[in-house]
Amino acid sequence: MRNLIPSYVRVPLLFFIIYGIVEYAIPGEQLAIVEEPLTIPFLILVLLILLATEAIAGLVENISLRSLDEEARARYLAEKEKPIDFAWWKKIYRSLTKAKPIEKEGEIILDHNYDGIRELDNSLPPWWLWGFYATIVFSFIYLVRYHILDAPDQSTEYEIEMAEARTAIEEYKKTAKDLVDFNTVALLTEASDLKAGKSIFEVNCVACHQADGGGGIGPNLTDKHWILGGGIKNVFKTVSEGGRDGKGMVAWKQSLKPSEIAQVASYVLSFQGTTPANPKAAEGEIWVDPDAETEVAPEQVSDSLTVAMN
Ligand code: HEC
């Protein structure tokens, strides 16, 4: 058996099998060797042991060969060269097919003769027969499970998994607030978010926009007029990417995290309709939310999500 696969195939093969097991046992985005650098010395050790085993086995063979006399050595070498006899496999094959060997087909030939075509009465191959019994058992279980006990069918399973995935996404979004960009951002209304937005605004923005949003170097943020577009998406984009070149509004994505931009943008929008102490004259156009007529309810959002994912 040892001679069946040469050592230059055996060693890499065993090594990659072990590597595969390691890879499987250490899940993660990255390769196991990146995720868990300790696996590198382990794998090197494995490789060394494999090589050492090969070397020792070869050595033992050499030594025992030397202790044999001429004749025994010749016999040993002849035995080693002998092609392997797959007797056990042939036996399994025969028991699986039960086919009569060609020499014995005479025993099972039927005397029907259609223009020289005659029929062999082979017994059904056991592999086929047992496969057939298995389908009967399977169909019975299937029938009971899906038609009597009403287990969920494929589309219900799909729905269940989609619902699970949707809650998982919601959960994930709660912990991964920085995943937002101007396409996905939604107006934050939680008091804690607005409070955080307020303190970001007070630190970074009041110099140009005033604490009450009335405007100074920067435009008035309390009116309905917007130079770069109103609504949470546009405001998020302006704060993140900055205003027009040379106007003085920098891209805050350098210094603020996406979650912070969403907070401060939501806070900016809370100025809408307030009256600042020293309002700057309106600049830009009156901005009308294109989605305003069709108020998007949360259910509709998840519906469109389903459509998008389908
Ligand atoms: C150095 C002064 C300055 C600072 C600091 C500043 N802005 Fe601005 N901001 C401007 C100017 C100037 C504009 C007008 C840009 C343009 O016309 O393209 C502007 C525009 C805006 C607009 C768009 C207004 C519109 O009408 O479209 C928003 C929203 C905004 N700023 C929010 C903020 C927020 C939030 C911060 C703090 C994180 C901030 N700005 C910090 C100067 C500033």
Image: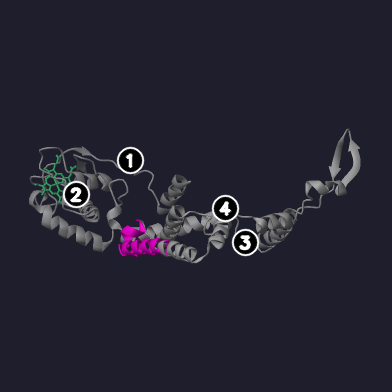
The CA distance from mark 3 to mark 1 is: 45 Å
The label nearer to you, 1 versus 4, is: 4
Residue 114 spot, x, y in % from top left: 89, 35
Q: Is mark 1 on a helix, strand or loop?
A: loop
Is any atom of residue 107 visible in this view? Answer: yes
Cβ(mark 4) to ligand 1 < 8 Å? no
Q: On the image, numbered disc 4 is attached to which residue? A: 155
Q: Which amino acid type is marked by label 3?
A: Ala
Quarter of the figure with the N terminus? bottom right
Q: Which amino acid type is marked by label 4?
A: Ser
Cβ(mark 2) to ligand 1 < 8 Å? no
- View extreme (right): residue: 111
For residue 253, which numbered disc appears in the image?
Answer: 2
Which is nearer the eye, 13 or 54?
54
Of the residues under marks 1 and 4, which one precedes in the sequence? 4
Q: Is mark 4 on a helix, strand or loop?
A: helix
Q: Residue at x 30, y 42 (%)?
A: 289
Of the residues under marks 3 and 1, which one precedes in the sequence? 3
User: Is 60 on the left or on the right of 271, as rendered?
Assistant: right
Q: Residue at x 52, y 59 (%)?
A: 2
Q: Is mark 3 on a helix, strand or loop?
A: loop
For residue 290, which numbered disc appears in the image?
Answer: 1
